[in-house]
Amino acid sequence: MVNKRSVFALASAAFLLAPAAYAHTFTDALTGGTPSLDMRLRMENVSDDAKPDDANALTLRTRLGYMTQDYAGWKIFGEMTNTSAFGDHDYASPDAKGAMKTTYAKVADPELSRINQAWVSYSGVSDTVFKLGRQRVILDNARFVGNVGWRQTEQVYDALVVANTSLPDTTLIYGFVSRAYNIVGAEVPSQSHVVNISYNGLPFGKITGYAYLLDLQKDSGALDSQTLGLRFGGKQALSDDFNLLYALEFANQGEYADANDGRDANYTKLELGGSFAGVTAKVGQEKLGGDGTYSFQTILATKHAFNGWADKFLTTPANGLVDNYFSIGAKPMGIKLLAVYHTFSADEGGDDYGKELNLLAAKKLGKNYSVGLKYANYEADTHGDDTNKVWLWGQLKF
Protein backbone atom coordinates (compact mmCIF):
# COMPACT_ATOMS: atom_id res chain seq x y z
CA MET A 1 0.00 0.00 0.00
CA VAL A 2 1.28 3.46 -0.77
CA ASN A 3 2.60 4.92 2.49
CA LYS A 4 0.87 8.19 3.37
CA ARG A 5 3.17 9.21 6.20
CA SER A 6 5.62 12.08 5.79
CA VAL A 7 9.04 10.97 4.76
CA PHE A 8 10.40 12.40 7.90
CA ALA A 9 8.70 13.93 10.87
CA LEU A 10 7.36 17.45 11.06
CA ALA A 11 6.90 17.14 7.31
CA SER A 12 9.93 18.43 5.53
CA ALA A 13 8.04 17.71 2.35
CA ALA A 14 5.34 20.07 3.54
CA PHE A 15 7.94 22.83 3.73
CA LEU A 16 8.52 22.22 0.03
CA LEU A 17 4.92 22.13 -1.07
CA ALA A 18 2.96 24.42 1.25
CA PRO A 19 3.00 28.20 0.93
CA ALA A 20 5.15 29.72 3.66
CA ALA A 21 4.08 32.53 5.97
CA TYR A 22 7.17 34.71 5.90
CA ALA A 23 7.99 37.02 8.78
CA HIS A 24 9.05 40.55 7.85
CA THR A 25 11.90 40.64 10.38
CA PHE A 26 13.93 38.13 12.33
CA THR A 27 12.33 39.39 15.53
CA ASP A 28 8.88 38.79 14.05
CA ALA A 29 9.94 35.26 13.18
CA LEU A 30 11.06 34.57 16.74
CA THR A 31 8.13 36.17 18.52
CA GLY A 32 5.38 35.22 16.08
CA GLY A 33 5.96 31.48 16.12
CA THR A 34 3.74 28.62 17.21
CA PRO A 35 3.97 26.82 20.56
CA SER A 36 3.01 23.15 20.80
CA LEU A 37 1.95 20.86 23.63
CA ASP A 38 1.59 17.07 23.47
CA MET A 39 0.58 15.07 26.56
CA ARG A 40 -0.14 11.34 26.71
CA LEU A 41 -1.24 9.57 29.88
CA ARG A 42 -0.97 5.78 29.60
CA MET A 43 -1.56 2.73 31.71
CA GLU A 44 0.38 -0.39 30.72
CA ASN A 45 0.00 -3.82 32.31
CA VAL A 46 2.40 -6.63 31.40
CA SER A 47 2.18 -10.27 32.47
CA ASP A 48 5.31 -12.14 31.33
CA ASP A 49 5.87 -15.74 32.47
CA ALA A 50 9.63 -15.04 32.50
CA LYS A 51 9.16 -12.64 35.46
CA PRO A 52 7.62 -13.37 38.88
CA ASP A 53 5.82 -10.02 39.12
CA ASP A 54 3.41 -8.39 36.68
CA ALA A 55 4.21 -4.83 35.63
CA ASN A 56 1.82 -1.96 36.19
CA ALA A 57 2.99 1.36 34.78
CA LEU A 58 1.11 4.65 34.81
CA THR A 59 3.16 7.23 32.91
CA LEU A 60 2.67 10.71 31.54
CA ARG A 61 4.61 11.91 28.51
CA THR A 62 4.77 15.70 28.08
CA ARG A 63 6.32 17.50 25.12
CA LEU A 64 6.53 21.27 24.94
CA GLY A 65 7.81 22.89 21.76
CA TYR A 66 8.07 26.13 19.84
CA MET A 67 8.35 26.69 16.07
CA THR A 68 9.41 30.06 14.69
CA GLN A 69 7.85 31.61 11.63
CA ASP A 70 9.63 31.30 8.32
CA TYR A 71 12.23 34.07 7.86
CA ALA A 72 13.83 34.14 4.39
CA GLY A 73 13.55 30.36 4.22
CA TRP A 74 14.80 29.71 7.77
CA LYS A 75 12.88 28.04 10.58
CA ILE A 76 13.89 26.96 14.08
CA PHE A 77 12.17 24.36 16.24
CA GLY A 78 12.86 23.34 19.83
CA GLU A 79 11.10 20.78 21.99
CA MET A 80 11.54 19.35 25.48
CA THR A 81 10.18 15.99 26.57
CA ASN A 82 9.53 14.50 29.99
CA THR A 83 8.24 11.10 31.03
CA SER A 84 6.99 10.81 34.62
CA ALA A 85 5.63 7.76 36.44
CA PHE A 86 2.89 7.72 39.06
CA GLY A 87 2.26 5.23 41.84
CA ASP A 88 4.76 2.62 43.02
CA HIS A 89 6.72 2.29 39.75
CA ASP A 90 6.04 -1.44 39.64
CA TYR A 91 7.77 -2.15 36.36
CA ALA A 92 11.30 -2.84 35.11
CA SER A 93 12.56 0.49 33.83
CA PRO A 94 14.73 3.01 35.70
CA ASP A 95 12.84 5.44 37.93
CA ALA A 96 13.79 9.08 38.42
CA LYS A 97 16.67 8.02 40.73
CA GLY A 98 17.95 5.34 38.35
CA ALA A 99 16.66 2.42 40.43
CA MET A 100 14.95 -0.51 38.71
CA LYS A 101 12.73 -3.31 40.04
CA THR A 102 14.17 -6.28 38.17
CA THR A 103 11.61 -8.85 39.38
CA TYR A 104 8.89 -7.07 37.43
CA ALA A 105 8.10 -7.39 33.74
CA LYS A 106 9.62 -4.72 31.53
CA VAL A 107 7.91 -1.54 30.38
CA ALA A 108 10.29 0.52 28.23
CA ASP A 109 9.17 3.91 29.56
CA PRO A 110 11.83 5.09 32.05
CA GLU A 111 11.43 8.37 33.88
CA LEU A 112 13.60 10.92 32.12
CA SER A 113 13.74 14.43 30.69
CA ARG A 114 15.75 15.63 27.72
CA ILE A 115 15.83 17.95 24.75
CA ASN A 116 13.77 16.00 22.26
CA GLN A 117 14.26 18.20 19.18
CA ALA A 118 16.38 21.25 18.43
CA TRP A 119 16.85 21.94 14.75
CA VAL A 120 17.11 24.64 12.12
CA SER A 121 15.78 24.22 8.58
CA TYR A 122 16.42 26.13 5.37
CA SER A 123 14.17 26.00 2.29
CA GLY A 124 15.70 28.85 0.28
CA VAL A 125 17.05 26.51 -2.41
CA SER A 126 14.50 25.52 -5.04
CA ASP A 127 12.71 22.23 -4.26
CA THR A 128 15.10 21.48 -1.40
CA VAL A 129 14.94 21.52 2.39
CA PHE A 130 17.96 21.24 4.68
CA LYS A 131 17.39 20.35 8.31
CA LEU A 132 20.23 20.29 10.84
CA GLY A 133 20.09 19.34 14.50
CA ARG A 134 18.31 16.93 16.80
CA GLN A 135 15.21 15.74 15.00
CA ARG A 136 12.62 13.06 14.42
CA VAL A 137 13.35 10.96 11.33
CA ILE A 138 10.82 8.52 9.85
CA LEU A 139 11.56 6.95 6.48
CA ASP A 140 8.81 5.09 4.61
CA ASN A 141 6.91 2.86 7.06
CA ALA A 142 9.68 3.16 9.72
CA ARG A 143 10.76 -0.45 9.14
CA PHE A 144 14.42 0.54 8.98
CA VAL A 145 14.61 4.14 10.25
CA GLY A 146 12.01 5.45 12.66
CA ASN A 147 11.24 7.22 15.92
CA VAL A 148 9.60 4.41 17.95
CA GLY A 149 6.70 6.76 18.52
CA TRP A 150 4.74 4.20 20.53
CA ARG A 151 7.04 4.58 23.55
CA GLN A 152 6.65 7.61 25.79
CA THR A 153 10.18 8.82 25.02
CA GLU A 154 10.76 8.59 21.29
CA GLN A 155 13.96 7.86 19.38
CA VAL A 156 15.55 10.95 17.82
CA TYR A 157 18.75 11.75 15.96
CA ASP A 158 21.44 14.40 15.71
CA ALA A 159 21.49 14.61 11.94
CA LEU A 160 21.71 16.58 8.75
CA VAL A 161 18.78 15.67 6.50
CA VAL A 162 18.35 16.97 2.95
CA ALA A 163 15.10 16.43 1.01
CA ASN A 164 14.84 17.27 -2.69
CA THR A 165 11.80 17.10 -5.00
CA SER A 166 13.21 18.72 -8.15
CA LEU A 167 12.61 15.64 -10.32
CA PRO A 168 8.98 14.95 -11.29
CA ASP A 169 7.15 12.67 -8.84
CA THR A 170 10.45 11.95 -7.09
CA THR A 171 11.61 12.56 -3.53
CA LEU A 172 15.28 12.12 -2.69
CA ILE A 173 16.36 12.10 0.94
CA TYR A 174 19.91 11.97 2.27
CA GLY A 175 20.79 11.99 5.93
CA PHE A 176 23.99 11.89 7.95
CA VAL A 177 23.42 10.73 11.53
CA SER A 178 26.05 11.67 14.10
CA ARG A 179 24.20 10.41 17.18
CA ALA A 180 21.05 8.46 18.04
CA TYR A 181 19.08 8.88 21.28
CA ASN A 182 17.01 5.80 21.99
CA ILE A 183 13.80 5.27 23.95
CA VAL A 184 15.51 4.50 27.27
CA GLY A 185 17.82 7.53 27.22
CA ALA A 186 21.00 5.98 25.83
CA GLU A 187 23.16 7.99 23.41
CA VAL A 188 24.76 6.09 20.56
CA PRO A 189 27.59 7.83 18.62
CA SER A 190 27.27 7.30 14.89
CA GLN A 191 28.77 8.03 11.51
CA SER A 192 25.86 6.63 9.54
CA HIS A 193 24.45 7.56 6.14
CA VAL A 194 20.85 7.02 4.99
CA VAL A 195 19.63 7.42 1.41
CA ASN A 196 16.00 7.02 0.37
CA ILE A 197 14.70 7.70 -3.15
CA SER A 198 11.03 7.27 -4.02
CA TYR A 199 9.11 7.63 -7.27
CA ASN A 200 5.35 8.15 -7.17
CA GLY A 201 4.63 8.69 -10.86
CA LEU A 202 3.42 5.19 -11.67
CA PRO A 203 -0.35 4.72 -12.04
CA PHE A 204 -0.30 1.56 -9.94
CA GLY A 205 2.00 2.36 -7.03
CA LYS A 206 5.10 3.85 -5.49
CA ILE A 207 8.62 2.47 -5.80
CA THR A 208 11.35 3.23 -3.28
CA GLY A 209 15.03 2.38 -3.25
CA TYR A 210 17.18 2.81 -0.18
CA ALA A 211 20.65 2.41 1.27
CA TYR A 212 21.17 2.49 5.03
CA LEU A 213 24.85 2.47 5.98
CA LEU A 214 25.02 2.15 9.76
CA ASP A 215 28.25 2.82 11.63
CA LEU A 216 27.19 2.78 15.28
CA GLN A 217 30.40 3.46 17.12
CA LYS A 218 29.37 2.24 20.55
CA ASP A 219 29.28 -1.46 19.71
CA SER A 220 32.69 -2.20 18.13
CA GLY A 221 31.03 -3.23 14.89
CA ALA A 222 28.49 -5.71 16.24
CA LEU A 223 25.57 -3.68 14.91
CA ASP A 224 27.25 -2.05 11.90
CA SER A 225 25.65 -3.01 8.61
CA GLN A 226 24.90 -2.03 5.04
CA THR A 227 21.27 -2.49 4.00
CA LEU A 228 20.32 -2.07 0.34
CA GLY A 229 16.71 -2.53 -0.64
CA LEU A 230 13.78 -1.90 -2.96
CA ARG A 231 10.12 -1.52 -2.02
CA PHE A 232 6.98 -1.33 -4.14
CA GLY A 233 3.48 -0.73 -2.88
CA GLY A 234 0.18 0.56 -4.13
CA LYS A 235 -3.51 0.05 -4.64
CA GLN A 236 -5.89 -0.33 -7.55
CA ALA A 237 -9.61 0.37 -7.66
CA LEU A 238 -11.20 -2.73 -9.18
CA SER A 239 -14.70 -1.32 -8.75
CA ASP A 240 -16.41 1.63 -7.14
CA ASP A 241 -16.44 -0.26 -3.83
CA PHE A 242 -13.32 -2.43 -3.84
CA ASN A 243 -9.61 -1.51 -3.77
CA LEU A 244 -6.86 -4.08 -4.22
CA LEU A 245 -3.85 -3.45 -1.95
CA TYR A 246 -0.35 -4.84 -2.46
CA ALA A 247 3.25 -4.47 -1.29
CA LEU A 248 6.51 -6.18 -2.20
CA GLU A 249 9.93 -5.54 -0.68
CA PHE A 250 13.43 -7.01 -0.75
CA ALA A 251 16.62 -5.96 1.03
CA ASN A 252 20.07 -7.40 1.61
CA GLN A 253 22.18 -6.72 4.68
CA GLY A 254 25.94 -7.13 4.77
CA GLU A 255 29.18 -5.86 6.24
CA TYR A 256 29.89 -2.18 6.76
CA ALA A 257 32.32 -0.07 8.80
CA ASP A 258 33.75 -2.21 11.63
CA ALA A 259 31.72 -5.32 10.83
CA ASN A 260 33.99 -7.90 9.18
CA ASP A 261 32.37 -11.23 10.04
CA GLY A 262 31.00 -12.07 6.60
CA ARG A 263 27.43 -11.25 7.59
CA ASP A 264 24.91 -11.66 4.79
CA ALA A 265 21.14 -11.83 5.30
CA ASN A 266 18.05 -11.02 3.27
CA TYR A 267 14.72 -9.39 4.08
CA THR A 268 11.52 -10.00 2.12
CA LYS A 269 7.95 -8.83 2.50
CA LEU A 270 4.88 -9.86 0.54
CA GLU A 271 1.47 -8.40 1.33
CA LEU A 272 -1.89 -8.58 -0.40
CA GLY A 273 -5.16 -7.10 0.73
CA GLY A 274 -8.38 -5.41 -0.12
CA SER A 275 -10.75 -2.76 1.17
CA PHE A 276 -14.51 -2.97 0.76
CA ALA A 277 -17.38 -1.13 2.46
CA GLY A 278 -15.08 0.42 5.03
CA VAL A 279 -13.35 -2.84 5.96
CA THR A 280 -9.69 -3.51 5.13
CA ALA A 281 -8.15 -6.99 5.27
CA LYS A 282 -4.56 -8.01 4.55
CA VAL A 283 -2.53 -11.19 4.49
CA GLY A 284 1.23 -11.17 4.31
CA GLN A 285 4.60 -12.62 5.14
CA GLU A 286 7.65 -10.81 6.44
CA LYS A 287 10.91 -12.74 6.51
CA LEU A 288 14.12 -11.64 8.23
CA GLY A 289 16.77 -14.12 7.19
CA GLY A 290 19.14 -15.91 9.55
CA ASP A 291 21.64 -18.76 9.26
CA GLY A 292 22.18 -19.62 12.91
CA THR A 293 25.09 -17.19 13.23
CA TYR A 294 23.90 -13.87 11.86
CA SER A 295 20.37 -12.63 11.26
CA PHE A 296 18.87 -9.58 9.58
CA GLN A 297 18.54 -6.75 12.14
CA THR A 298 16.64 -3.45 12.02
CA ILE A 299 18.54 -1.41 14.60
CA LEU A 300 16.95 2.02 14.04
CA ALA A 301 13.42 0.84 13.22
CA THR A 302 10.13 1.45 14.97
CA LYS A 303 10.15 -2.23 15.87
CA HIS A 304 6.97 -2.22 17.94
CA ALA A 305 4.93 -1.74 14.77
CA PHE A 306 6.17 -5.05 13.34
CA ASN A 307 6.17 -8.72 14.36
CA GLY A 308 3.63 -8.34 17.14
CA TRP A 309 2.92 -5.71 19.78
CA ALA A 310 4.20 -7.95 22.58
CA ASP A 311 7.71 -7.02 21.36
CA LYS A 312 9.11 -10.55 21.44
CA PHE A 313 11.24 -10.05 18.34
CA LEU A 314 12.92 -6.68 18.87
CA THR A 315 16.15 -8.58 18.17
CA THR A 316 15.87 -11.08 15.32
CA PRO A 317 16.80 -14.59 16.52
CA ALA A 318 19.99 -16.09 15.08
CA ASN A 319 17.93 -18.49 12.95
CA GLY A 320 15.92 -15.61 11.50
CA LEU A 321 12.20 -14.92 11.65
CA VAL A 322 9.24 -15.71 9.41
CA ASP A 323 6.11 -13.78 10.35
CA ASN A 324 2.92 -14.89 8.61
CA TYR A 325 0.09 -12.53 9.49
CA PHE A 326 -3.51 -11.61 8.81
CA SER A 327 -5.15 -8.30 9.72
CA ILE A 328 -8.63 -6.88 9.49
CA GLY A 329 -9.67 -3.35 10.36
CA ALA A 330 -12.55 -0.91 10.11
CA LYS A 331 -13.55 2.52 11.38
CA PRO A 332 -17.23 2.51 12.41
CA MET A 333 -18.42 5.82 13.88
CA GLY A 334 -14.87 7.12 13.73
CA ILE A 335 -13.54 4.36 16.01
CA LYS A 336 -10.44 2.69 14.60
CA LEU A 337 -10.71 -1.08 15.09
CA LEU A 338 -7.89 -3.44 14.19
CA ALA A 339 -7.18 -7.13 14.78
CA VAL A 340 -3.92 -8.83 13.74
CA TYR A 341 -2.95 -12.50 14.07
CA HIS A 342 0.67 -13.65 13.70
CA THR A 343 2.38 -17.02 13.51
CA PHE A 344 6.16 -16.93 14.02
CA SER A 345 8.76 -19.45 12.93
CA ALA A 346 12.48 -19.71 12.21
CA ASP A 347 13.88 -19.04 8.75
CA GLU A 348 16.65 -21.59 9.37
CA GLY A 349 15.27 -24.94 10.54
CA GLY A 350 11.61 -23.90 10.58
CA ASP A 351 11.04 -24.19 14.34
CA ASP A 352 7.74 -22.76 15.55
CA TYR A 353 8.47 -19.74 17.75
CA GLY A 354 4.92 -18.91 18.80
CA LYS A 355 1.78 -17.05 17.83
CA GLU A 356 0.23 -13.73 18.77
CA LEU A 357 -3.09 -11.89 18.73
CA ASN A 358 -3.21 -8.08 18.66
CA LEU A 359 -6.36 -5.97 19.17
CA LEU A 360 -6.80 -2.19 18.99
CA ALA A 361 -9.62 0.31 19.46
CA ALA A 362 -8.81 4.03 19.17
CA LYS A 363 -10.88 7.17 18.75
CA LYS A 364 -10.12 10.82 18.00
CA LEU A 365 -12.25 13.23 20.00
CA GLY A 366 -12.33 16.38 17.95
CA LYS A 367 -9.15 18.00 16.73
CA ASN A 368 -7.04 17.83 19.87
CA TYR A 369 -7.93 14.71 21.86
CA SER A 370 -7.75 10.94 21.43
CA VAL A 371 -8.18 7.79 23.50
CA GLY A 372 -7.23 4.18 22.90
CA LEU A 373 -7.23 0.61 24.17
CA LYS A 374 -4.75 -1.99 22.94
CA TYR A 375 -4.05 -5.67 23.72
CA ALA A 376 -1.34 -8.20 22.85
CA ASN A 377 -1.32 -11.91 23.68
CA TYR A 378 1.80 -13.94 22.80
CA GLU A 379 1.74 -17.73 23.18
CA ALA A 380 5.26 -19.16 23.11
CA ASP A 381 6.40 -22.42 21.56
CA THR A 382 10.22 -22.33 21.34
CA HIS A 383 10.91 -18.59 21.67
CA GLY A 384 10.37 -16.47 24.76
CA ASP A 385 7.57 -16.90 27.28
CA ASP A 386 3.82 -16.43 27.29
CA THR A 387 3.06 -12.71 27.60
CA ASN A 388 -0.03 -10.52 27.88
CA LYS A 389 0.03 -6.74 27.53
CA VAL A 390 -2.78 -4.21 27.93
CA TRP A 391 -2.59 -0.46 27.28
CA LEU A 392 -5.14 2.26 27.96
CA TRP A 393 -4.35 5.87 27.10
CA GLY A 394 -5.58 9.38 26.53
CA GLN A 395 -3.75 12.09 24.58
CA LEU A 396 -4.05 15.78 23.87
CA LYS A 397 -2.22 17.84 21.24
CA PHE A 398 -2.21 21.60 20.75
Image (tube, helix red, strand yellow):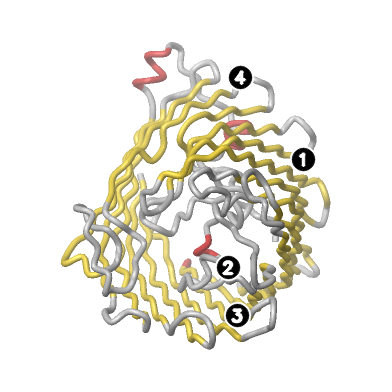
Left or right of 58 on screen, residue 70: right
Name the amino acid type tagged 2: Thr
Of circles 2 and 4, which is in front?
Answer: 2
Asked whether residue 220 is in view, the answer is yes
Residue 124 is tagged as 4
Q: Looking at the image, is 332 positioned above or below residue 234?
A: below
The residue that disc 1 covers is: 169
Q: Going 41% across and 30% down the picture, which residue do you hit?
A: 67
The disc, 1 or 4, on the residue closer to the chain's N-terminal end is 4
- Image coordinates of residue 17 in percent, x first then y, are 63, 33
Q: Amino acid at mark 4?
A: Gly
Q: Earlier in the sequence, mark 3 or mark 1?
A: 1
Asked if disc 2 and disc 4 are in contact, CB closer than 8 Å, the reply is: no
Closer mark to the observer between disc 3 and disc 1: 3
The residue wearing badge 3 is 344
Report the amino acid beneath label 3: Phe
Disc 2 marks which residue? 316
Tell me how far mark 2 sits from mark 1, CA to CA. Answer: 35 Å
Residue 51: image quadrant is: bottom left
Select label 2 or label 1 by which is in front: 2
5 above or below 194? below
